[in-house]
Amino acid sequence: MAQATFCRARAEDLPAIVAMLADDALGRAREAPDLPLDARYAVAFEAIDADANQLLLIAECNGVVAGCLQISFIPGLSRTGAWRALIESVRVSSALRGHGIGRQLVEFAIDEASRRGCRLVQLTTDRSRTDAHRFYERLGFVASHVGMKLELRGEAPLRG
C-alpha cells in the first residue's frame, strides 16, 4: 500500500486534478484537460478555495498528485440541525489505482467531516461506476437514497 499525504489543493495542482477528472469514459465527455486549461477551471478553483465550507483535497505520493476529492460542508435543519459533508469528484490517478490511495483519501475526508462536527457523510456516484459502488460499500457507505440530477445547458460563467 502506498502512503499518501493530504493537503488543500493549490492552483498549480489544477492540471493534474483536471487530468484525473477526464481520465475515464464519463470524464472524457465532460472535461477539457488540454493545456492551457480552460480559464473556467481557475475561476471555479478560486471560488472553492475562498469558501470556508468547501475543501478541494489532494493526495500526494512522492511529490506527485495521486488523487483528489471535493468536500462540501452543508448546514441543514433536518436531523436536528445537523451538518453534513458531501464528497464529490473522487479520483485516483490511473497509474496509482489499487494501492490504497482512494481508501486513505476517503477516510481522511470522513475524519475531516467528523472533526468539523458533521453527523452525516454522503456522496453520489454515477450509476455506471459499479467498481466505485463496491469501493464505497467496503468503506461503510450504504445506498440508502435515490439521487437525481437535472443537467442545465448553460456553461459556467467566467466570474471573478
Image (spheres, grey):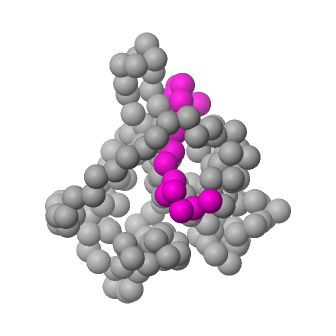
Q: Is residue 42 left or right of residue 134?
A: left
Q: Quadrant of the C terminus?
A: bottom left
Check if residue 59 falls in the magenta segment. no
Q: In this rendering, is residue 102 above or below 155? A: above
**Residue pushed farthest bottom?**
35
**Which of 70/23 is in front?**
23
Q: In this rendering, is residue 45 above or below 110? A: below
Rendered location of residue 92, percent (x, y)? 61, 66
Q: In this rendering, is residue 111 above or below 45? A: above
**Residue pushed farthest top?**
80
Q: Is residue 89 left or right of residue 46?
A: right
Rendered location of residue 25, percent (x, y)? 50, 76
Rendered location of residue 24, percent (x, y)? 53, 75
Q: Residue at the location (33% across, 45% down)? A: 51
Q: Is residue 4 left or right of residue 25?
A: right
**Which of 75/23 is in front?**
23
Q: In this rendering, is residue 43 above or below 115? A: below
Tell me the quarter of the picture where residue 77 sits. top left
Specify whether residue 157 is in view: yes
Q: Residue at the location (38% across, 27% down)? A: 75
Q: Residue at the location (68% across, 45% down)? A: 137
Q: Quadrant of the N terminus?
A: bottom right
Q: Which residues are magenta?
A: 113-130
Rendered location of residue 131, percent (x, y)? 66, 61
